[in-house]
Image (cartoon, rainbow, N blue to C red):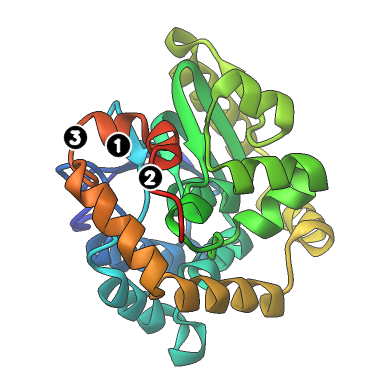
Amino acid sequence: MTDSFETINTRLDGDVLFATFHAPPMNLIGPGVVRDLATLVGELSLPTAPRVVVFASADAEFFFPHVDMTKVPEYTAEAAKAGGPGDASLGMLFRKLSETPAITIAMLRGRARGAGSEFLLACDMRFASREHAILGQPEVGIGAPPGAGAVQHLTRLMGRGRALEAVLSALDYDADLAERYGWINRAVPDDELDGFVAGLAARISRFPRDALIAAKSAINAISLPSTAEVRADAASFQQLVRSEETQRRTAELFEQGFQTRGSTELRLGEALGDLRAAD
């Protein structure tokens, strides 16, 4: 495995790879993260790849707060290098993650909103700190629908009503409510989270590789959205994120400290409700 990522620290323990995102100042999903993730996803498709990958964040407050709204063209270009011009979207990159033979487990502390939540949804399993995890889909509050998998995954996991609530409200959800709704597998007390996830990953890694791949492939065939659905969501997001209303609302957020380690990011779900209403 590559050990020279710019934004991912890796550690191999037996057949489990621990991959920890570290992209200061606050783990925004920008071109560096997308470039490293695309490389890692490619490596996880190799026959020699570890059986299990555990994703975590080095930032206690932010797993992935959302994409870097100042670098949408740049991170999209990095995604295009992974999938080709026709698949220039985070949604298709995340789908490739879902399709890798490796079993992917997300261990969530801090905030995972927007594409950060969608990254978690692309992983095979999600376990979150009961005390320190927040999930949200803020896109509609900014002016565009989610474009990297949330519409597809949340509807399948939660059902129509709760998916509409999560997406249209643009509110923050704590781990207990996210567990109840099906957004995550399980909320775990923070002091037990590392041990629980490491134990589960080690257990799975000891099972036959062919059986793991066959079982994951069968479940994917039932549960993953089609590539056409993923591309349609990406196109809708990419169209509306450039709209005048989205630009106005984003500018208002930046005036309040958006994309800095302040109260606006810490309470983004609440802040979105305080934006000036559309004309």
- Sequence-wise, which precedes: disc 2 or disc 1? 1
Q: Mark 3, residues whose alpha carbon is within 10 Å: few (<14), some, or many (≥20)? A: few
- Sequence-wise, which precedes: disc 2 or disc 3? 3
Say which amino acid is labelled 2.
Leu
- State whether residue 82 appears in this view: yes
- State whether residue 58 appears in this view: no
Q: Secondary structure at mark 1?
A: helix
Say which amino acid is labelled 3.
Arg
Q: Mark 2, residues whose alpha carbon is within 10 Å: few (<14), some, or many (≥20)? A: some
Position of the N terminus, as image quadrant, is bottom left
Instruction: Find residue 58 and report its horizontal and vertical position in percent.
Output: 26, 34
**Could you tell me which residue is drawn at 59 percent across and 27 percent down?**
200
Q: Secondary structure at mark 3?
A: loop
**Residue on which the image places disc 2:** 275
Residue furthest bottom as drawn: 85
Residue 277: image tag: none
Q: Is 69 placed above or below 66 here?
A: below
Could you say which is closer to the camera, residue 75 or residue 261?
A: 261
**Could you tell me which residue is drawn at 62 percent across and 48 percent down?**
168
Say which amino acid is labelled 1.
Glu
Q: CA distance from mark 3 to mark 1?
A: 6 Å
Q: Mark 3 touching mark 1, by CB under 8 A?
A: yes
**Residue on which the image places disc 1:** 265
**Could you tell me which residue is drawn at 67 percent across and 31 percent down?**
185
Instruction: Find residue 270 and report its horizontal and vertical position in percent.
Output: 43, 32
Q: CA distance from mark 2 to mark 1?
A: 14 Å
